[in-house]
Image (spheres, rainbow, N blue to C red):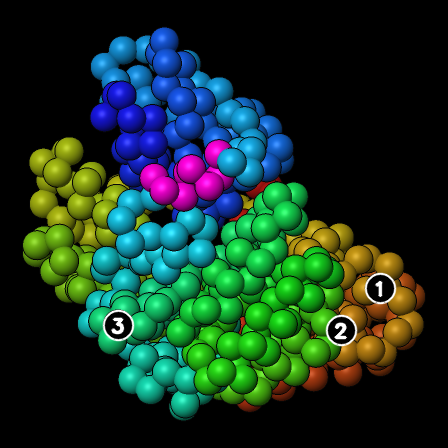
Amino acid sequence: MHDDPAALWQAALKVLSAQVSRANYDTWLDGTVGVHFQHDLMTVGTRSEFVTEWLQKRLRPAILRTLSEIVGHEVEVRFEPLRPDEAQVAALHQPSGEQPRVAAIRPRLRERYTFANYIVGPGNQLAFAAAEGVAREPGRLYNPLFLYGAAGLGKTHLLHAIGHALLDKGQHVVYLSAEAFTNALITSIQGRKMDDFRQRYRSADALLIDDIQFIAGKEQTQEEFFYTFNELYEAGRQIVITSDKGPAHIAQLEERLRTRFEWGMIADLQAPDMETRVAILRHKAAEQNIRVRDDVLHVIAARFKNNIRELEGSLTRVVAYSRLTGESLTPDVVASALASLQTNEPKLPPSPDLIMDLVCRYFDIDRTGLLSPSREKRVAYPRQIAMYLMRELAHRSLVEIGQALGGRDHSTVHHGWRKMEKSLSVDPETRRDIASLREMIEQSRRIA
């Protein structure tokens, strides 16, 4: 292997693929080749000057360490863009059956993120059923499928579950985050490889995109995704998208994309109820072959209500604490293990400024728009939510809220507050937005 730079670099890539995120691998390492290896100096060919510079600045230490471990002693590495003749030679060194950059690479999906490991409750029942339908009849039942909800509620789990099911059917599945899509686009533009870029994503039987809100405000990314979406949709290929907001509330999203996202099925995921949280913990304990009493699970479930990742992480923390201390798992041990995660010190109510800052960040609008007289939905809805939160969490008077929001009349504030209060009982979108903002505010509150 040491005499074959292409084989040596392929071995290094295999190791590096487990050390970096899929987005970074696809954007910066995919398509690189080992060109020369002489006098302990590895020359790695890249697709562009842009990739060369990034690898030199950001991944060089990891690459040096990986190559040195494989060779058995310290080596040096140099990155340089491939010349046309080298690119042709590099194609010959691709592993058998693969083609450079446009090959049908198996997506990296988490093994445990399957339908069998997904706990269904009232808050995610519709999303789960829609995801199963897509996996059963891709491109026919719900296309596109748009899943949205706050962080940690299981969107990515469902996306991976769909991917696993479609791979089992022998379909060509492409899974990536919207951030990775943008990075890949930038790299393709820099390297003048747009044909390869389009072929990679438009040849898929199913395109699974995580966190689509990332493309908001990125004009060229939205343009490219629009045409990719159209081509796949018209060919009857399945598209599944996740986001932290519904299409109507993603600021700076082009209207033509918004309408396409609304063509198929839109399903939201809400925070799990108590019974579902306990079921999730039971499943997690069974996976790890741990026996945990129900009263212990109920104590943990009562403390973590809005984020499944935090819920599962808390069980791991409690079990580790029990093993380290040698104490049996009891509600008292849970309290001790999780004591550092929750302070008992009193907290000040959130200030109107804090609420406005977080509302603006959440809805991706600026303070000027929030305080403006505009009645457009994209600023009117966030403004009314701010009114509700200032009233319920900051305990401010209607007059104080009106003054904070640009000198509005108290009757206007009263109307907005009551409207959101009523909407909470009938509109899942409002419930999710307010729950997410409550969590953001809680994390930012100042200690008294």
Q: Quadrant of the N terminus?
A: top left
Magenta span of residues? 86-93
Q: Up-down: is 318 above or below 258?
A: above
| Between 383 and 400, the one nearer to me in the picture | 383
The residue at the point 52 percent across, 52 percent down is 180
Q: Is residue 430 visible?
A: no
Q: Up-down: is 418 above or below 397?
A: below
Name the secondary structure under disc 2.
helix
Name the secondary structure under disc 1.
helix
Q: Which residue is mark 2?
A: 378
Q: Nearer the viewer, mark 2 or mark 3?
A: 3
- Numbered label tally: 3
The residue at the point 26 percent across, 72 percent down is 170
Q: How far apart in space, not on screen, are marks 1 and 2 (Cα)?
A: 9 Å
Kind of residue at disc 2: Arg
Q: Are marks 1 and 2 in contact (CB under 8 Å)?
A: yes
Q: Which callout, 1 or 2, points at the residue further toward the start of the chain?
A: 1
Q: Is residue 357 left or right of residue 303?
A: right
Q: Is residue 398 left or right of residue 318?
A: right
| Between 78 and 256, the one nearer to me in the picture | 78
Q: How far apart in space, not on screen, are marks 2 and 3 (Cα)?
A: 42 Å
Kind of residue at disc 3: Gly
Label 3 Cα neighbours within 10 Å, binned few <14 / some 14-19 / many ≥20: few
